[in-house]
Image (tube, coloured by chain):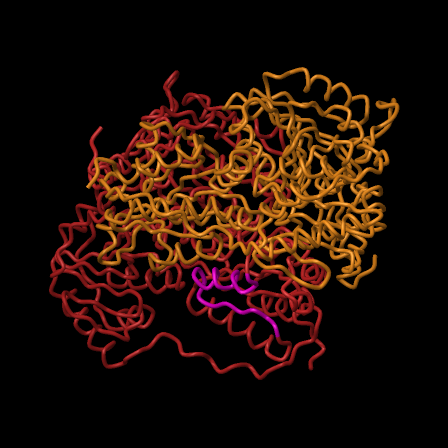
Chain colours: A orange, B red
Amino acid sequence: MSETAIGHYLLNRLSELGVKHVFGVPGDYVLGFYDQMEHSSVSHVGTTREDTAAFAADGYARCNGLGALAVTYGVGALSVVNPIAGAYAESAPVVVISGAPGTNEVQNDPMLHHRFGPFTFQREIFERITCATAVIDDPVLAFRQIDRALAAALRHRKPVYIELPRDLVEQPGVEVAAPPDEQMEARDDAALAEAVAETVELLAHSKSPVVIAGVEIHRRGLQKPLLDFIEHANLPVAATLTGKSVIRERHPNYLGIYSGALSNDDARRVVEDSDCILMLGMTLNDIDTGGYTIQLNPQQMIRAAQGDVFIRHHRYPGAPLNDFLTALNRTGRPRTEALPRFTTGPEATNFPEKDRAMTIARLIGRLNAAITPDMMVVCDTGDCLFAGVELRVHDQTEFLASAYYTTMGYAVPAALGAQVARPQRRALILVGDGAFQMTGTELTSHCRQGLAPIVIVFNNRGYSTERFILDGPFNDIAEWQFHRLGELFGPLDGYDAPDECAFEQALTAAVANTDTASIINVRLEPRDASPAMQRLGAHLKARLGRED
Amino acid sequence: MSETAIGHYLLNRLSELGVKHVFGVPGDYVLGFYDQMEHSSVSHVGTTREDTAAFAADGYARCNGLGALAVTYGVGALSVVNPIAGAYAESAPVVVISGAPGTNEVQNDPMLHHRFGPFTFQREIFERITCATAVIDDPVLAFRQIDRALAAALRHRKPVYIELPRDLVEQPGVEVAAPPDEQMEARDDAALAEAVAETVELLAHSKSPVVIAGVEIHRRGLQKPLLDFIEHANLPVAATLTGKSVIRERHPNYLGIYSGALSNDDARRVVEDSDCILMLGMTLNDIDTGGYTIQLNPQQMIRAAQGDVFIRHHRYPGAPLNDFLTALNRTGRPRTEALPRFTTGPEATNFPEKDRAMTIARLIGRLNAAITPDMMVVCDTGDCLFAGVELRVHDQTEFLASAYYTTMGYAVPAALGAQVARPQRRALILVGDGAFQMTGTELTSHCRQGLAPIVIVFNNRGYSTERFILDGPFNDIAEWQFHRLGELFGPLDGYDAPDECAFEQALTAAVANTDTASIINVRLEPRDASPAMQRLGAHLKARLGRED
């Protein structure tokens, strides 16, 4: 036996892997672990709810490489099923630590509080939304179980689940030799070489090649190799919506977002006119394909994703994205043609105009001028996400969203985690009124941590994405005076922005105040919508087979 | 084929079973069903989040016999896992209706938004927290699948799950003959008769018999037979904490709560001194046993629960509670001894005292005098629940809580459902500050529905139950100005109550204002606690093996 208690071992390993903060709400089955955390190099960051702790851990993981939360059994763990399913779908490596009744408590199958079924059920649920689960029930195996779960999270970039019975957290475990590195993604060197050679050849003989960079670039940390490749090869590059900001959006080679009907005009034109489209880490989900509205000719497609390279109608298995990109960098020759100048994010002209009501298009245009290099944009689900297609953020990985799983209420808590991970960055949070009513009061934890995000509430008094698909009174919601939220908790400055002049004043004041969180209630017409959402809404409506 | 669309059939069946309101948040996979709801006799009640919709449906089900919610796939359904597990643990029959991608959309296994894994996983998760699941995928079987799921909810008093692919909701189904009544609980008439005879004999020969009535009395709707039995037999009766209010708490035979260390003094003395304890519908969970601190002699116990009757060390299988109670009513002879007078709920004397800070004990004492017969108490988890041991409510089933599963954040949304089900009743909501920070903003939906609950926030700036088990900074939370919540939405009157005089004014005004919701911020010392929690906390701490 070692001298190290199982709970401390887990905390030490998290700390070694860069996890210095664990989010969560305490509860009696996890209190012992919380107490250990107080005596460790890992800090607890409290949230008001468990699901927001999980969103915060997701935001932290995306900025930091790994995130964690600790919750109690049943009521705590089952409250994070949705955000953890989202972390799985979005490839955010989050460690879920759930307390549990002690092994000494469950032997006669007692009806303990927070219990909802056989004691195995909680793990069985998490097996469906994580890439590895470990129920610690034997001190001899505990350290190894913990190591394997953490390794799986890092390898697959997916959440994992560790269940800690409360009588074991203070028991010493058994040190084991470090496990051999588990098999990384399968690689077939011959296939890789052939795929690279064919790609180089196709690029060299194409007239108008273009790159689409997808979300896997971010999740596998390949932004730098991508940038090197783009600059070396001198190619134009678009990002998908879920991959937004994998390349600096003010980079001269950057085209904008290509996601079918959701695309920027420039990006759509260049991509769909291209005779050779190299898709790097692009996932063919319904968001990034704009509801399957992409118009690309498979004869002109090269796609590296999920460990394989697909060229036209054949596939090279065993060609991981990382290795493929590295090899391309070494092999390809730069194109000599000068790139055309692409439009950057549109800026609103003559903003503010007196007595002019706020619209989404001009709001985004104004924000494009306001975003500074020290900001990161954290965006919720709804029209703020689609409107975000027109936003240009500065640095890499500075746009965080649940862009594929599209769970509402992501942004405010995820921004908490992102800012804790990157204290030098300020979050600009874009969120709809419906999403803010779900989790917006988690802003109290930003205030408690001394953070100073700027929250822009897109207040159109309802679920506007759904209004564009099928409208009814069910899409209307209660009106909140979001700018008055500072009456409830703070310090928090609030601003009402019914028109452009009021918004201009509010934005200026909020940007200037770097000490305190700010919230701006942007009042929009219920039928106002971003161009991207209008395009997508028309398509989704057609898929439902309905007309207005 | 019938003329009835599958979605309409479900709505019709719900309406026939008394479900006139469906809670939930719309989303694109369930919009078609929402549209059908607009053209049905069932109304949609919007909530800000999906989990609060599920708590509301739980509160509705407890008052109405059945409740329902409708949510979208993935992000919606997975957000209700915790409240539905709670409804399972607490036996509240709630119908979860989840939209889903159309059967025509999933054939090539596409990466649709809101997806988190194989399309079967969502049902597999719900199979672990409901008593029946149905994925509608064949119009020929749809009506039958719906009927069976609803029958299971009613029979088992547990939640069920119905998944509705969006392309099928408007398709006509096939009418089937009403299914034969499925087997109810197994009954063995000979065993039942023998159990009744032995019980009558034991009661007749005992000196100090007592009844403990548990939560199954409420969930099986047996309050009236229980009352008849108690009055006919002239027996004193205690309730468990999860069964609180199964008998009118101002009934002369009522002793108070018996739950081991959580008990009222009177109840504990009478029950533990009794020579014959008849336990009707009492579940031996760790709450109702006060953390297994009940001190009862098995030689003196008769327990009818979960279909069986246990007398001392033998068991009569096949003796359902309903039949057992009916038979006892017909058979037993009344006791002739006069019952002693039991103390009713303590009332605070000389309330308010000038400059006296608020304490939980005197708060409860004051509420005992304030509760009127038109109120129902909806109580959250935490010390408000344990303090509720001393509350005396008027009528039957007028105390609602997640008393066994003990999920925080239950009360405000559950009270929404309870009041929608019983519009003539006013909710008195008891809730801690931590629980209110979880779901309290759902009060916006009370306001939107024109309801006028009175919310009493037990504000002790932290998770006080956990403070009594193992304290640390993780038990402290941010301070909210709960009485200022009406600045955010309304109409909502708020009152700050730092002392007794302020509370008295606030309570008087809130009770008098039956048009508008009211919230009272009761400021308590962090270490103040109800006597019941102090007893339970000491016990839980001992179980953790820790001392202050």
Q: Residue at x 32, y 37 (%)?
A: A33
Q: Return the residue nearer the eye: B337 or B278.
A: B278
Q: Quadrant of the N terminus of chain A?
A: top left
Name the image quarter holding residue A403.
Answer: top right
Number of residue marks: 0
A403 left or right, relative to B380: right
* Residue B133 lies within the magenta run: yes
Q: Return the residue nearer the eye: A251 or A513.
A: A251
Q: Residue at x 65, y 28 (%)?
A: A428
* Residue A109 lies within the magenta run: no
Q: Residue at x 55, y 67 (%)?
A: B17
Q: Return the residue nearer the eye: A128 or B31.
A: A128
In percent of width and height, residue A94 lies at: 48, 42
Tell me the magenta residue range: B118-137
Q: Quadrant of the C terminus of chain A?
A: bottom right
Q: Residue at x 74, y 55 (%)?
A: A301
In percent of width and height, residue B360 lies at: 35, 30
- Residue B490 in sight in this render: no
- Residue A202 in sight in this render: yes
In percent of width and height, residue A537 lies at: 78, 51
Name the image quarter holding residue A292.
Answer: bottom right
